[in-house]
Image (spheres, rainbow, N blue to C red):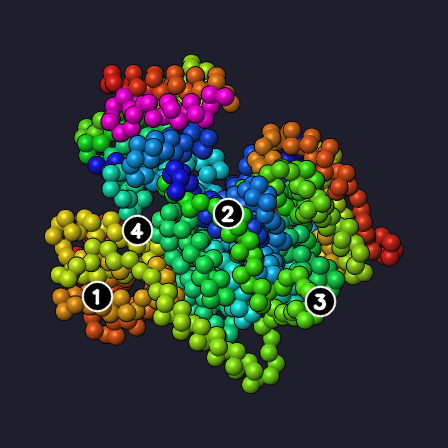
Amino acid sequence: MQVIAKRPDSLTDLNFTYCPGCTHGISHRLIAEAIDELDLRNKMMGVAPVGCSVFAYKFFNFDMAEAAHGRAPAVATGMKRARPDMHVFTYQGDGDLAAIGTAEIVHAANRGENISIFFVNNAIYGMTGGQMAPTTLPGMKTSTSPYGRDEQDIGYPIAACELLDSLRAPYYIERVSLLSPQDIIKAKRAVLKALKYNKENRGFTFVEFVSTCPTNWGMTPLDAMKWAKENMYPFFPVKLFRDKGEEGGK
Amino acid sequence: MKTELICSGFGGQGALTVGKFLAKAGMQEGKNVSWLPSYGPEMRGGTANVSTVISDTPIASPLVTNPDILVALNQPSIDKFGPEIRPGGLMIANTDMCPRKLERDDIDAIYAPMSTIAKEIGSAKVLNMVAIGMIIGKKNLIKYETIEADLTAFLKKKNPDLLEGNLKAIKKGIEIGQNS
Amino acid sequence: MGEKVLMKGNEAVAEAAIRAGCRHYFAYPITPQSELIEYMSRMMPKAGGTFVQAESEIAAVNMVYGAAGCGKRVMTSSSSPGISLKMEGISYLAGAELPAVIVNVQRGGPGLGDIQPAQGDYFQATKGGGHGDYRMPVLAPSTVQEFADMADLAFELGDKYRTPVMILSDGLLGQMMEPVDFKPRKTEAEMEELDKQHFDWCIHPNQDEPNRHHHEINSLEIDPLILEKHVIHLGEKFDKIEANEVRYEEYKLTDDCEYLIVAFGTAARIAKSAIDELNVEGVKIGMIRPITVWPYPYEAIRNALTPKIKKILVTELNLGQMIEDVKLAVEGKVPVEFLGKVGGILFTPQEVKDKIKGM
Ligand SMILES: Cc1ncc(C[n+]2csc(CCOP(=O)(O)OP(=O)(O)O)c2C)c(N)n1
Ligand code: SF4
């Protein structure tokens, strides 16, 4: 992993409450670093989800709101409309964004809201103890798919980027991963881009992180990384889906 | 007769299962029992504890505040619940994880390197059975035969080695309990 | 009756529901209820039933609406924040007169709150958390056995009155294990009977004329004169339920009692320990424990007010909700005091004793 010397100003001094080897800590840090680098801290606000990252409102060192499960994009919409001079992002897990919050994310994207979404896809519900998520892979056993996810009965994993990419309004959509140091460097670039566009009020930006949940997958952090590469990439390929900043040539 | 227990330790040490096996044995012996775990985020790596009540009469409150028996598998458990033990009560503590003793002379305390004993028997997992044995050896709470029958029914076909390890651990625990 | 099994409340109520003929269950995970949905995910397929983890509590309760409209015994479960989301659906179930069972394993609120046991959803459950003029039977268990037994009772009441029924439990009852004695599973013949019981109004396969039916599962009635009739009809049904279905327990309540505790669910359990100890110390005190919190046992409380009763104590795991119903029953005749704990904290029997002694 990267050796990171200094804690970003955009993170508070609190220790993360995540399990050892959990990727939530990495994605927090990437977002905080990008905000520091873009000098956005005093104009930044964020929305925490309901999920393992529920306490993100304590970890980011600027004003934060905690939303009801799945509703973060709606809350962010309200915040951005009330404070257009500031910038807002949501941080959401896959249950939060792609199950209970499907309506909110689709419609925020469809409106082209001037918000950034950071979406952590770990293929499971972490917080509540390992139930099936909309992103759970076919055949994968969880505490509510004890016989393995049966895609004939409950469908295939939802790919959020692909889904949102069918809408016209979004400005930037990219899927990155946190599964190796190189991947993390690429992920950092995507986060920076999303927040830069956000700073320039260009529209709706969306970054998905292919992540792990060693605890509920029942694996060591290293095995989890390996498993994710082998099993998640086929369903969630790392890819730039849309970048209007590039194609629009500005 | 009503006996109230708290079993407490790090998540994964098996404190909850100590309570569960005792409650189940109590039930099989025709008693009223309840098992109330702590739950929530502190389970993640933190300390887990369970209130267990075994009683001849129906159990009203399942919440134990002043236990007759404390099973402390780690130091935080002694620090937190030790002072709450009812005078005349019993504490069973795992010295492998508890460097400090409880400063009380109005209770019985049995200290034993339970983690080491479990490992010697073959698996850290049987630590809970050592604890159960120590209680059986010291107190007339439940019978060895009840737990033996329960474990045998459950494990005989599935995992005879584990069954043997478990029974060995209980017997070792009983020995410690009787000799202290 | 078989052998007793040691089980968590969450699992026991799920098992009892399957035994009572529930073959359709839809829900969304939430702590401290998740063992219930997890149990159903394991056991429903084995029972030949349907389990769907819905995308949200709103979807789950509407799946319930659909299955109930087809005349099936159907259940959903959640904990407080998720129950709020189900409230729209519950109002529709009540309006369309559909039997269904909703389990609430309450936790601390409001908002996201915490995940420890609480009773803060009493108002929501008993006074109509959804919109419109409706009532639904609300059963409040206080042991794991009772929690399990209530699955059967809830389905029976639902079918009898064509109404949603809520089991108002909490995190303590959901998480704790106690021995449970289950009723036998419904036989094939009984299941067939159950399936046909609502054929006069539910959606089911049709026949050619003259035996054709056209059934509508609906709560819309745009003509006020017709809606008026419908709501009056609902009102009469609620009156019937109030007349026939009140349930409560009297505990250590004798003619010479000087104090009366009124409490439900987990709070009642803890207070019972206090009563046992107070009785030993010579304090004359007993309890009324509402088992149905709607319909509410007003009559039972009124009847308990002998001239000897000096004071009433209401204990709840909230800021004081059921106490309003107790006061309605008491009509100012005796002072009513309150002991509450919030935030998912439980009071101890000692605290109840101290409160009584200070009264
Ligand atoms: C309305 C509502 N329903 C359910 C819950 C329970 N709940 C909390 S977190 C969570 C799932 C979180 O999973 P995910 O979004 O994948 O995030 P992760 O924990 O994996 O990071 C659920 C179902 C809730 N708090 N509120
Ligand atoms: S449960 Fe999974 S997602 Fe949650 S903190 Fe632990 S490893 Fe991370």
Give the label, 4 or 2, closer to the camera: 2
Q: Earlier in the sequence, mark 2 or mark 1?
A: 2
Q: Chain of mark 3?
A: C
State the mark number for residue C187: 2
- Residue A187 seen in this snapshot: no
**Residue type marked 2:** Thr
The residue indicated by pointer 1 is C304
4 and 2 marks on the same chain: yes
Q: Earlier in the sequence, mark 3 or mark 2?
A: 2
**Residue type marked 4:** Arg
Image quadrant where residue B77 sits: top left
Counting from the top left corner in percent of width and height, residue B178 is at 25, 18
Dividing the image into 4 quarters, which one contains the C terminus of chain C? bottom left
Residue B175 lies, with reference to residue C349, above or below; the image says above
State the mark number for residue C269: 4
From mark 1 to mark 4, how far is it between C-alphas? 20 Å
From mark 4 to mark 2, how far is it between C-alphas? 35 Å
From mark 3 to mark 1, how far is it between C-alphas? 59 Å
Image quadrant where residue C109 sits: bottom left
- Disc 1 beta carbon < 8 A from ligand 1? no
Per the rendered image, the range of residues in magenta is B133-157
Q: Chain of mark 1?
A: C
Name the residue located 48 percent from the left edge and 62 percent from the top edge: C158
Left or right position of A182 against A147? right
- Is label 4 in contact with label 2 (beta carbons under 8 Å)? no
State the mark number for residue C208: 3
**Residue type marked 1:** Ala
